[in-house]
Image (cartoon, grey):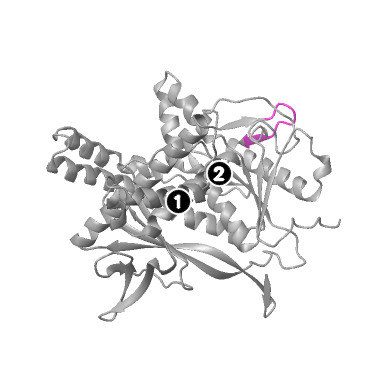
Amino acid sequence: MAVVDSVMKHEIKRTYRYRLYPNEAQKQKLARTFGCSRWVYNWALETKTKAHYQDEESLSFTDLSSRLTSKKKEEETKWLSEVSAVTLQQSLRNLNQAFTNFFEGRAEYPSFKSKKGDQTARYVGTAFDIREENGKRKLRLSKMPGLINIRWSRELPSEPSSCTVTKNAAGQYHVCFVCTEEVELLPRVNGENGALEFVGVDLGTESLVTLSTGEKVGNPRWFENEYERLRREQQKLSRKEKGSNNWERQRKRVAKVHQRIQDRRKDFIEKLTTRLVKNFDVIVVEDLSVKNMQRRGASAASVQNSRLARHITQAGWSQIVRRLRDKCKWYGRTLVIADKWFPSSQRCSECGHIDGKKPLGRRSWTCSECGQHHDRDINAAKNLSRVGQTRIQAPETLPKSESFEIVVGQGMSEPARESK
């Protein structure tokens, strides 16, 4: 953490993504690199799993790395030497990180990679760099013929420490550079001596986001807007012979529709979360069990519940919370994640009376205790805002059964309690 001209700054690592345009020879080499990286990851996962269950042995990254060196010398797998050794070592490191995430409870047990999904290869150190050719900056990769064209949508803030080349299901190539960047911590909204600006954020399907200020951000419904086009393209795909050239071309058309939906959702969420972080000091959201909600909706017999599961999947709630978490750390804001059992929709924001569960179709209700009429979503957002204020300013008054996660900016502490 550094202070420059009365502005606090700190360094973060951020990923910058650009579109790649390889030629045919480079595409073939990348396909081989993707395949070798995927094979090494799956081989290492199988080897590590068998060693644990059959031999009761725990293989470390060093053990797998030395076995990989021997594997490359065998006649059956000597083709591994045709691609950069760095990408193969990074596959082992990725698996090692996957097991770390599993043992620390952040992810499930690692699974085998498929050639049908997104393909990736990671380069570090001297295995890549950016060079100039004919007045254009291009990407050089180890054991890659020539330089790869990049569409530079913005400048890199510093020299990248690593890059990951990806190919999605639509056949599009991208490169992600990891750079160290110095960012400024945002000042308080109401000034250094002003009161903290709190906001409760209720996530939904009718309105994607409802704020405690009364503002509602409508759900763009990216999937529904592209549904007819997607249905037509999938019908065309079903009429093609699987595995044929026509089938492959049509499969890419379907994948491009899905990619368009994904890109539009990501762009909208990035802009929304940036606006929230800039305009409020403390943001309060609810810990929603998205997977359980999807499972309950999908397993229900009614068409209405199955549609609800689809709407929840397409809304991107988890992505919103994840981006808020990242940006609050970057810019010195505070994110409060309320317990998933907190009755935000059941409690009256005026008197605090809990009026019981309400069906999802009931969008407004009247408190039986004080008679106040509430909009369901705005009331929930107000409750989140108030419980966030209590958690920050008077945590001892909260019941022990209610747990909260506090995410603060890097190098920062929880906001101090305000004097009365």
Q: Are marks 1 and 2 in contact (CB under 8 Å)?
A: no
Q: Nearer the viewer, residue 140 or 326?
A: 140
Secondary structure character of the magenta stretch overall: loop
Image quarter in which the C terminus is found: bottom right
Q: Say whether residue 334 is visible.
A: yes
Residue plotted at (67% across, 25% down): 356
x%, y% of residue 99? 53, 42
Q: Is residue 84 left or right of residue 267?
A: left
Q: Is residue 108 left or right of residue 2?
A: left
Give the number of marks. 2
Q: Magenta stretch: give its range.
A: 367-374
Q: CA distance from mark 1 to mark 2?
A: 23 Å
Give the residue type at disc 2. Answer: Asn
Q: Is residue 331 left or right of residue 145?
A: right
Image quarter in which the N terminus is found: bottom right
x%, y% of residue 354? 71, 29
- Residue named by callout 1: 66
- Position of residue 152 relative to residue 366, above or below, is below
- Describe the element under mark 1 as helix, strand or loop: helix
Which image quadrant is residue 338 in?
Answer: top right
Magenta-colored stretch includes residue 373? yes
Q: Nearer the viewer, residue 410 or 83?
A: 83
In the image, farthest residue toward the top: 301
Q: Is residue 339 left or right of residue 167?
A: right
- Residue named by callout 2: 101
- Describe the element under mark 2 as helix, strand or loop: helix
Q: Nearer the viewer, residue 43 or 144?
A: 43
Residue 395's disc number = none
Residue plotted at (39% across, 41% down): 42
